[in-house]
Image: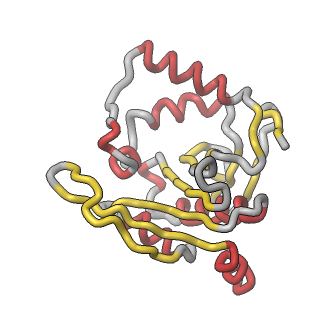
Amino acid sequence: MLYSVLEMAVIATGNQVILRDRLQADADRFIYWQTHGEWRMLDAPWEGVQSSLTGEQEANLRAQFYKSCTEELPLPRKRVFIARKDNYPIGRVSRYGEDRTPEAWMVGIDICEDDLLNKGLGSEALGLWVDYLFTNSTVHRIGLDTWSFNPRMRHVAEKLGFVPEGSQREARQWNGQWLDLVHFGMLRTEWQQKRVKR
């Protein structure tokens, strides 16, 4: 089932954050995030961390963002914005990988506002996202990968009940250091048991 993005949906509400569709009004924050924030150094920085955009790059990014706000959205969503309760956007969550393994998805999260890190917002947002995905699909497994230089993400994964599943040791070299790719997973049965205990 598809919904028009013009019918902006809040898909989940927590104590501190909401998960919602992106809005054209979010474009300025989204563009700002491309050149600001600690998240860029924790989310595959080897893919290129920009400190500025040319006028043309910004115009293209804005046009692509506006276009994405008019596209039909799948259920369950593939990505949504994280916002404070006052609707101010602070980051995003996503799911991916379903083309190769339709019963096993991967999730990601970025809190893009540095002054809102270490306040539990990411944990709440990712927990809402996992609940939303399991509730609105038949997916069997949700995985989460992070790098060994990101202890905050490893802590969030374990706090939410993701099970450590090992790592690919020294999977990438970055800034003269070998990094492990650390794997976490949660099965539908584990998620259901966790919900019963709440």
Who is closer to the viewer here, 173 or 27?
173
In the picture, residue 2 is in which quadrant?
Answer: top right
Instruction: Give me the residue at 40% from left, 49% from top.
Output: 43
One can see residue 17 in this view: yes
In the image, residue 42 sits, relative to residue 146, either above or below, namely above
Instruction: Give me the residue at 73% from left, 29% from top.
Output: 71
Q: Whole-percent x and y of residue 93?
A: 58, 51
In the image, residue 97 sits, relative to residue 186, either above or below, namely above
| Horizontal arrangement in the rendering, residue 117 relative to residue 181 (left or right) | right
| Horizontal arrangement in the rendering, residue 96 relative to residue 38 (left or right) | right
One can see residue 83 in this view: no
Q: Whole-percent x and y of residue 88?
A: 62, 43
Q: Whole-percent x and y of residue 160?
A: 56, 73
Q: Whole-percent x and y of residue 173?
A: 22, 52
In the image, residue 195 sits, relative to residue 22, either above or below, namely below
Instruction: Give me the residue at 63% from left, 45% from top.
Output: 79
Instruction: Give me the residue at 54% from left, 73% from top.
Output: 162
